[in-house]
Image (cartoon, rainbow, N blue to C red):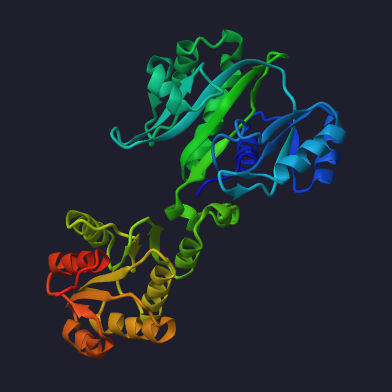
Amino acid sequence: MKLHEYQSKQIFAKYGIPIPRGRVAATPEEAKHIAEELGGRVVVKSQVLVGGRGKAGGIRLAKTSKEAEEVAGQILAMEIKGLPVRKVLVDEAAAIDKEIYLGITNDRAAHKPVMMASMAGGVEIEEVARQTPELIIKAHIDPLLGLRDYQSRDIAYKIDLPRDHWRVFGQIARGLWQAYLDCDASLAEINPLVITGENKLVALDGKMVLDDNALFRHTDLAEMRDLDIEAPSEIEARRYGLSFIKLDGSIGCMVNGAGLAMTTMDIIKLFGGEPANFLDIGGGASSEKVAAALRIILSDQNVKAVLFNVFGGITRGDEVARGILAALDEVKPQVPMVIRLVGTNAEEGLRMLANAKMITAETLADAAKKSVAIVKGGAAQ
């Protein structure tokens, strides 16, 4: 789950990271009032969860409160990469001397979090890594020990940060690590962390990505979710506890088990097809959940066939069959459906589906071949 800049910076501030004075506005009039409180000279920043806001005209400097009102009105009328701008962050403008990148993410190869820093701040870190990787300094963090003081000092030294900023930089680095840890984040990033004209370190921008699987521990953070960036089908799937990701293919997939779902998608591609989604209905799925899953799959206009691959261990075949039949009665699908159903109560489930005009398959390979043949205009045998 991605957080907006203003949300990330609010969290950073709780951990002692200095941020500019500013507030969020949803109307030009609100932006004007905030600018007046801040003294007139402000930066108006669109709050959308995509990169390239500045290049798209979504970040503008305003020298007066009246200009802030005008700029906010223009930005709030924008769409950036297909996302509407619903809020702007109005921050006091800062005189920038140097820009630094500072971030923490997971290094899966090392099995540890890694803190990264660079004096090439203000641009995307991926671009720095591609063009000048030697400018990125890394320090792996032992999750049992946390970020040590010597590590932040070592980073400050290696990025040539002036020594008079080392103490505050250490506080910022520790605050960023603690925010990352406490929020169950997969990314916490300050870009840029600037040295201002007043010789102070300030986090001008912030970004956090949270682990969805840990949100049950953070109901306050879960409420910050921005639904604009999510497909309606993914929002609906979350309501029913389904693991669903929309893709661009034409074969809808309903599978019980994440590993089996990945295998199903791989085999569809092996035989020349393209999966339309990843969907794991989980173990012990009820007929209500199965019906919801089928509704979500069939809401995609690109779907030309649906492949069910159900292995009945915890999940019972007859329960899956009831869910399919309930969904068929409700949705009235116009696309062919192929089912491979094995395991617990599979025979009973297949008997229930016998009159539903579904195409059956004994193996996953057979089911994938039949699904691909359907979407390519052939007849499934």
Name the residue at 56% across, 56% down.
227
How far from the left and from the top, in percent, is residue 162?
57, 9
How far from the left and from the top, in percent, is residue 225?
57, 53
Task: Kindly tell me whether residue 148 is visible in this rendering.
Answer: no
How far from the left and from the top, in percent, is residue 32?
84, 39
Q: Quarter-wise, where is residue 172 in the image?
A: top right
Q: Quarter-wise, where is residue 331 in the image?
A: bottom left
Give the residue at the far front of this rendering. Answer: 377
Q: Is residue 127 above or below residue 34?
A: above
Q: Is residue 43 above or below residue 366?
A: above
Name the residue at 42% across, 19% down.
136
Residue 73 as seen in the image, left or right of residue 12: right
Name the residue at 79% across, 48% down.
27
Q: Quarter-wise, where is residue 91 in the image?
A: top right
Quadrant position of the C terminus in the picture = bottom left
Q: Is residue 181 above or below residue 218?
A: above
Residue 52 as seen in the image, left or right of residue 138: right
Q: Is residue 135 above or below residue 316?
A: above
Task: Kindly tell me whether residue 54 is visible in this rendering.
Answer: yes
Number of numbered markers: 0
Viewer-proximal residue among 261 and 194: 261
How far from the left and from the top, in percent, is residue 149?
48, 21
